Image (cartoon, rainbow, N blue to C red):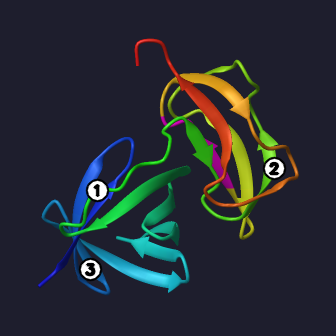
Amino acid sequence: MPRRITLRSDAHEETIDVLDDQRVSQGGVIRRLNWEGPGVARVDGERVWVVGSGRTRWVYLDGCVHVFEIEDGDAPRRARSHAGSLAAPMPATVRQIRVKAGDVVHRGDTLIVLEAMKMELPVRAGADGTVAAIRCREGELVQPGVPLIEIAPAEGA
């Protein structure tokens, strides 16, 4: 019997059935997984990077970092982290901060660029809002889960 997991993020919720070590079913569509090494996989041939801690997974795909809380089966729903903060998905060095406090940002805007494992990780806004605070500086080594930028929701959001 497949193992069912639920991925929840601020943007959506997805249920996935893990069929075996190399296949998952997403909405009835079978996707192939090929692990290239720790934290690096190909899903239907497309490379993704995955880092996790507890039930949280950071997935880097198509230039965006997606944060998911994983739930197995009927496990109780856990409290989510504050939606208005952006954090590093893994230990990384802050290479570039592209915004300052007070800037208006839109979903998808690159706010900060991190470097980890010899790759650049642009951290993008998940929603429209205003930069409330920047809690890091360029050149700083940051840890996963620590808020780097606080975003206040856009008016009417």
Can you give x and y, in whole percent of width and height, for residue 63 in the image?
A: 56, 50
Residue, disc 1: 77
Residue beneath label 2, please? Answer: 95
Q: Residue at x 59, y 32 (%)?
A: 109
* Residue type beneath disc 2: Arg
- Closer to the camera, 126 or 149? 149
Q: How much space separates mark 3 and mark 1, taking CA atoms?
A: 25 Å
In the image, what residue type sits under mark 1? Arg
Mark with earlier residue (2, 1): 1
- Identify the main secondary structure in magenta: strand
Q: Mark 3 and mark 1 in contact? Answer it, CB < 8 Å.
A: no
Q: Within the magenta stretch, is there residue 123?
A: yes
What residue sits right under mark 3 in the picture?
23
Identity of the residue furthest to the top in this view: 155
- On screen, residue 3 versus residue 90, left or right, reads left
Residue 64, placed above or below residue 36:
above
Chain part drawn in magenta: 121-126
Quadrant in which residue 86 is drawn: top right
